[in-house]
Amino acid sequence: MRLRPGRDSDAGGFIALIGRCWSDYPGCVLEVEHEEQELFALESFCVGRGGALWTAEDGDVVVGMAAILPTEGGAWELKKLYVHPDTHGSGLGQHLLRTAEAHAASAGASRLVLWSDTRFTRAHRFYEKQSWVRDGPIRALDDISRTLEFGYMKPLDGVQPLTAAGAASAERRLAEILVACVEGGASVSFLPPLPLDAARAYMRGVAQQVAAGRCILLAAWTGGVLSGTVRVQLDTPQNQPHRAEICKMLVHPDARRHGLGQALMLAAEAAAKKAGRTLLTLDTFTGGAGERLYRRLGWIEAGVIPGYSLDAAGQPEATTLFYKQIGD
């Protein structure tokens, strides 16, 4: 297979490819003449708007395509990413996606967005594996297919709060981060080896808490990869409506030393303050990297509890309690 810039003359191949992909989903009808006219000259459509288009060929047959266009506020929108079903599992979709993302990054994009038909469940799993998360409400298109679409997004770098839908769609990636941190020796309530299914069940519960308004979940990306998370727990006792607890500040071992921990903590403090909380508390393994970070960010030690938890070898380890006043 060969990847090259897309051309207007690829119109027939594009239409055949999209039609084949949509044929697996009952009710999806490709109406080019009235609803997808840009397919007749897709290169002109994309380039004329400052974007780019790619075609993947197997011989002289179009087996893949992708486009990306700038939108408002520094965001770029991924459009018309399709690969022929016969190429599933070949890595072609990932190659097309990374090519489009790299193009947007080189053009100064800060955030990527896309819309995907709610029926395209395989595509949703693919995007979520590539660190995309659900964002915003479902939108309805007034088209022949009666399309409903999910919005997805990801920053190339930075921290974003996740909605309940975003937290649910990020479940697997957040679970992978948790497993990697536990394997790396992090003292975060779990012991290695932590099965991925158990980590996913935990993160599923977190998404439910987000949906119920009991916590704020923040996620951090670096280089377009979801690599860190922290939670602001809001369901404090009735006599502590001014307090929130910082929980499970996690940065994937592969993404450390990029400032993600500090960025997550500062974002958590800002989110807690916006939620009306003025006092924050947390606990952390005594002597670890987390403790050094919290001290550097102005957290105050409240005390040390010896033997608070056990490490992977079954030995007791101490925990340090911290607090921080962020308002009157």
Image (cartoon, rainbow, N blue to C red):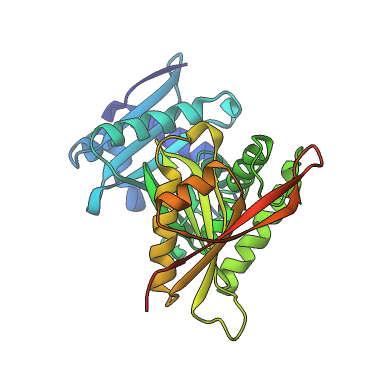
Which quadrant of the figure has residue 260? Answer: top left
Q: Return the x and y of residue 174 as percentages of the image width and height.
A: 59, 47
User: Which quadrant holds the C terminus?
Assistant: bottom left
Front-most of 123 and 304?
304
Q: At 36% across and 35% down in the image, what residue appears?
A: 101
Which quadrant of the figure has residue 181? Answer: top right
Image position of 240 with respect to 132: above or below: below
Q: At 49% across and 79% down in the image, what residue appears?
A: 242
Q: Could you tell me if residue 141 is visible in this image?
A: no
Which quadrant of the figure has residue 270? Answer: bottom left
Q: Count the labels in the image.
A: 0
Q: Return the x and y of residue 4 as percentages of the image width and height.
A: 34, 20
Q: At 46% across and 34% down in the image, what residue appears?
A: 16
Q: Return the x and y of residue 219 as percentages of the image width and height.
A: 48, 52
Looking at the image, which residue sits at the far right? Answer: 314
Answer left or right for 163 relative to 37.
right
Front-most of 144 and 181?
181
Answer left or right for 79 relative to 230.
left
Q: Could you tell me if residue 150 is visible in this image?
A: yes
Looking at the image, which residue sits at the far top? Answer: 59
Q: At 75% across and 52% down in the image, what residue appears?
A: 307
Front-most of 328 and 51?
328
Q: Return the x and y of residue 23 as percentages of the image width and height.
A: 57, 43
